[in-house]
Image (cartoon, rainbow, N blue to C red):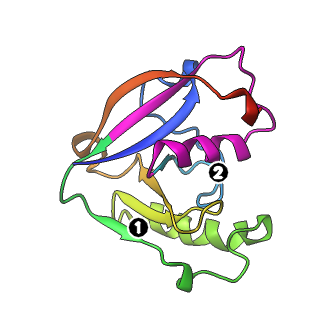
Amino acid sequence: MMEVFKICREKYANALNASGAANRWNKKEEFVIYAGGSRSLSALETVVHRAAINISNPYKLLTISIKDKTPIKEIAIKDLPANWNTIEGYIKLQEIGSKWVNSLETLILKVPSAIISQEYNYLINTKHPLFATNIRLESVVDFAWDKRFL
């Protein structure tokens, strides 16, 4: 079993749902859960994608388990455009991610983090047939932000 991590506001922490909002690797109405390969990467990803972390809103750390032998497609940096880790690169990455989401090729897409390219984020396709059987929310615990981040 592999574990990945997601940090979110408490009101979104009770289930594994995706918003359908457009992000770096998906277009609008494509329901993908973004998770980090480590707790610390998940914290950094949350901080850089929020205009502000409001510590008056409780946050939770979700541990998500992925069953062994679950199909994972990996995107290597060498296969990405030079500007992949910039806002300008979003259009090309959304095309790559959208193709993956709609193909149902694999349940998981492993992608390099734009923050720390040697680490990985894991996208989970909530519409994939294996989602219900191969993905499980293992735990939800309080997450306290270090005030130096804020």
> Where is residue 5, by image quadrant?
top left
Image spot of residue 101 (x, y percent): 46, 61
> Where is residue 87, by image quadrant?
bottom right
x 63%, y 69%: residue: 93
Residue 45 to residue 15: above or below = below
Image spot of residue 122 (x, y percent): 45, 55
110, 93: nearer the viewer: 110
The magenta span reads 37-64
Residue 135 to residue 96: above or below = above
Q: Which mark is residue 150?
A: none
Quick check: can you spot residue 49? no
Image spot of residue 60 (x, y percent): 52, 24
Does the magenta run of residues contain 63?
yes
x 49%, y 49%: residue: 36
Helix or strand or loop: what does disc 2 sit on? loop
x 42%, y 52%: residue: 125
- For label 2, count other residues whose C-alpha is less than 10 Å away and answer few (under 14), some (14-19) or many (20+): few
- Amino acid at the residue labelled 1: Ser
What residue sits right under mark 1 in the picture?
Answer: 103
x 49%, y 78%: residue: 76
* CA separation in Å, label 1 and label 2: 16 Å
What residue sits right under mark 2 in the picture?
Answer: 28
Quick check: can you spot residue 64? yes
Q: Is residue 133 left or right of residue 54?
A: left
Kindly check if marks 1 and 2 are in contact, taking CB atoms under 8 A apart as contact. Answer: no
- Amino acid at the residue labelled 2: Lys
Does the magenta run of residues contain 109?
no
